[in-house]
Image (spheres, rainbow, N blue to C red):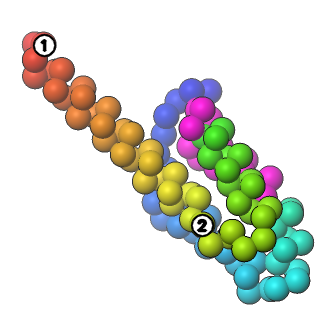
Amino acid sequence: MSKKTTPNLTICIIMDLIGCASYAFPVVGEVADVLWAPISALIFYRLFGGSAFAAFGGVFNFMEELFPGTDIIPCFTLGWVVQRVVNGRKTATEQKFATVVP
């Protein structure tokens, strides 16, 4: 599965908000993070198309959810931004070569 996709930004923001929800429940939240971390990592991997970027992001997301105090990092939204920049550069490069080569 190496298809590069960029998920909807709204979905990414919602996923980040779900990850931050553990701050609402101080003790229960940290236990919930242990359960949420692998689920969140798998969702990240699937949302971003199962590429190498998605695998790296999934691992980063997993670690971010496990470590206390790091839930504030918006992994899904950052992944969306990075994916858009990468796709934007590829599109610009393809357009550049399309105008040079008829």
- Residue that label 1 marks: 101
**Residue 22 is drawn in which quadrant?**
bottom right
Residue in view at x 75 percent, y 55 percent: 63
**Residue 94 falls left or right of residue 26:** left
Rendering coords of residue 4 (x, y %):
49, 34
- Residue that label 2 marks: 73
Rendering coords of residue 57 (x, y %):
62, 46
**Residue 30 is drawn in which quadrant?**
bottom right
Magenta-highlighted residues:
36-53
Q: Is residue 37 shown in magenta?
A: yes
Query: Is residue 8 among the parts visible in the rendering?
Result: no
* Mark 1 surroundings within 10 Å by alpha-carbon count, few (fewer than 14), some (14 through 19), many (20 or more): few
Disc 1 to disc 2, C-alpha distance: 43 Å
- Residue 75 vs 57, above or below: the answer is below
Which-is-in-front pick, marks 1 and 2?
2
Q: Amino acid at mark 1?
A: Val
Q: Of helix, strand and loop, which one carries label 1?
A: loop
Outermost residue toward the top?
102
Number of numbered discs? 2
Rendering coords of residue 24 (x, y %):
74, 86
Residue in view at x 10 percent, y 13 percent: 102
Q: Is residue 95 shown in magenta?
A: no
